[in-house]
Image (cartoon, coloured by chain):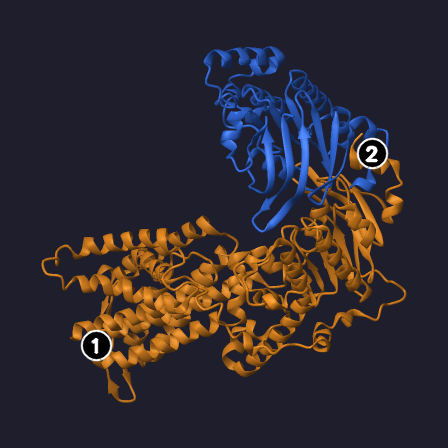
Chain colours: A orange, B blue
Amino acid sequence: MDYVVHIVNVALVYAALAASLNLVLGYGGMASMAHAALFGVGAYTSALVTMHLGVNFLVGMAAGAAVAGAVGIALALPSLRIRDEYLILFTCAFQLVVWGLMVNEVTVTGGETGLSGIPRATLLGLRFTTPRSYLPLVAALVAAMFLGCWRVSHSPFGRVLRCIREDEAATASLGKDVLRFKALTFLVGGAMAGAAGGLLAHYNAYVNPVSFSLDASILLVAMVVLGGSANMLGSVVGSALLIGIPEALRFVPGTATLIAPLRTAIFGALLVLFMRFRPEGLLPEHLRLRRRRRASIPELSPDEVAKLVNLDEWAPLDQNLVPMLEVKGLSRSFGGIVAVNGFSMALTPGRVTTLIGPNGCGKTTVFNLVSGFLAPDDGRIWLRGEDVTRLRPHELVRRGVIRSWQDVRIFRSKTLLGNVMAAMPRQLGESLLALFLRPREVARQERENERRAMAYLCFVGLADKAFELAGELSFAEQKELSLARLLASRCSILLLDEPASGLDRASIEAMGREIVRLAQAGRTICLVEHNLDVVKDLSDDSVFMDQGRVVRKATPQELMRDPELARIYFGG
Amino acid sequence: MLLEVKNVSSGYFRKPVLRDVSLAVGQGEVVGLIGHNGAGKTTALRTILGLVRTDAGDVRFEDRSIAGAPAVENVRAGLTLIPQERFTFPDLTVAENLALGGHNVRDAELRDRTLAEIHELFPILKARSAQRAGTLSGGQQRVLSMAMAMMAHPRLVLVDEPSLGLSPLAVEEVCGIIAGMAKRGMGVLLVDQNVKRTLELSHRVYVMKSGRIVLEDTGESLLRRGAWWDLF
């Protein structure tokens, strides 16, 4: 019986561990193959601290968490800008290095044999020795760690992580500092893994490198994927299955010698079958989406919608029409090709400015430069007199400049409400400290944001679909959702990349009315558009570009009377 | 009519692009399709070939419905598309590219005869037979892509932006090839950014705006207008 309890204890520790990896892998979308290394760092740290300093095991665990968190950050920093297979390779290498240190730094780690005689846990005069006595302690600590992961994942912070997983550039374009979120996720994931490592060290009273090898990392990834990535309970299920099934097989007579190879075969077979038939895992991310608390957000009256959307936030207009955003002499080349060459323009509040020109003339590159997604080779961008030339996208959004995307780039796997809420600025719940220290304020702001998000959805006519997945919307609705997202950011300068492309006439007209309304309410709007009907109807000013240069600035009607521009646009 | 597109709507997942599009191409005819960026011109070509699913309406080729048929079958039936980008296999030699173009022609003798013809028409392709296609100039690659299409013995050629990124001289050559295809009796449906050139080359022209055909006219009469802003 003790043996069964022992297995339960181990499975619990692995559940916490898988949950912490789930933050990084499932929510953050960063395939880290070095989680067992962080686990090991925590275990060794906790063991060494308690053995040499004689402190309580909880202090040891805390030290393990701190060191593993720091190592997590060290792992994160070089890997923040790489993705997918490169991240996998990089973290694999990191895992092997740490494992190599564990095996070879014999004086510190005891090498292959590891460390034994690690003090067992004591708490309030209680000594924990047998698996059975440990069970409540392990369960309580694992529950605490699990709740920590749960809190982080089910919060505005977790929401941003899921956005990053789906589309990093789109997340940055909504004003989120993607690198900060990724680094913090590695920190939290690493610290939790370290704490779990400490707990296992004191429970077993020994550590050796076997538990912290690349195999163990792969096993952890398997737990997360099998249980269901981005579902915290899934990690518990995954751990129970992958720890429990091979152990259960021990009770099958005559298989004792077969168990090791069988274990590997079962992992492999299970993973293959699951990837084939249930790629989303046992407990998928959106298990209960449809039944979510639709009722908890009260219906909004038109007055409330108007008040919450606060369209006139940027009115009254400055009658002098001082330029809001000024671009001077912007240049950028790719290899030998000059995409933008000495481009200048000024955007004025309350006016709609359109960039037009033939294919490949550099319109989208201008947007990428002005919104911070590309750094210019030359030239300056001034925002209300401040030089913002080399700011990153999220810094520009904080100053009020936001862009939309030609291909919409909504978060397809999130609800409409989630899409809009992700775009809201200055969310308390995006700070990890606030999540744990000021939970009430976080909850209050979240409720307030939910109401405002609903109001924005009402404004674009999508309120009745608030709880549906954005990926299920029609293309015209996705464009409207993307507009709601821009409004939710409360930016005053909107750069719209082809807002009307792919829409039918009725949707184009609706979109046009909304854009005009936004300009009238004092926003500064710049758009790239190819449908000249839209350009003529909407724009006050237009800028004709060719080969990266401004050819002429005038009203659309004037531009279309210029025979030279016709030659450029239609070919000669 | 060689090709008849009747009231076709199509698009990508959840994103309708073509709306009730009807057009026709006859034998030996160059038909131009012009319109603003994102108007749906490329999608029209891809729908006709069967790369994009037809949601409504019918596509008829030589009086047989081919709506919903996979592109592979349509190529065997005599359609071919010269795409905007990635129109040759850069890591294969010129000869291998041409062989791939004729992949669907079962008759080996016919294949050899076509190849000889092509070598006569475009001596550069014979001279560069063993060279990797990726090392050819942009204009030469365009010529190769046209020759690949001809290897398949199509009766209808869909050409997407053949002048993109080419020097004026290379554009002249490509236009010559397109006119030559029509003279040999093939139907050509041509999409190009260069409106003037398209009008000059085309017998008839359709204008697309936001996924719909808004005008049909002869190339000649549209050329006389001088400016086309209202159509875009």
Subunit of label 1: A
The extreme front residue here reads B63
Q: Quadrant of residue A489?
A: bottom right
Q: Residues within 10 Å of mark 2 (few under 14, many from 20)?
A: some
* Residue A459 rendering spot, x and y as whole percentages: 70, 67
Residue at 70% x, 74% y: name it: A305
Front tag of 1 and 2: 2
A223 with respect to A25 (left or right): left
Residue A567: which disc?
Answer: 2
Task: Please state, as top left, top right, bottom left or bottom right, where the C terminus of chain A lies in the image.
Answer: top right
* Residue A34 rendering spot, x and y as whole percentages: 38, 58
* Residue A135 rendering spot, x and y as whole percentages: 25, 79
A410 with respect to A127 (left or right): right
Task: Please state, as top left, top right, bottom left or bottom right, where the N terminus of chain A lies in the image.
Answer: bottom left
For marks 1 and 2, the one nearer the N-term is 1
Number of marks in picture: 2
Residue at 34% x, 75% y: name it: A142
Residue A359: which disc?
Answer: none
Q: Looking at this view, is A179 or A302 the one in front?
A: A302
Amino acid at dot 2: Arg
Q: Looking at this view, is B48 or A520 the one in front?
A: B48
A68 with respect to A415 (left or right): left
| Residue denoted by label 1 | A131
Determine whether A191 is above or below B3 in the image.
below
A105 with respect to B168 (left or right): left
* Residue B62 rendering spot, x and y as whole percentages: 59, 26
- Residue A343 visible at all: no
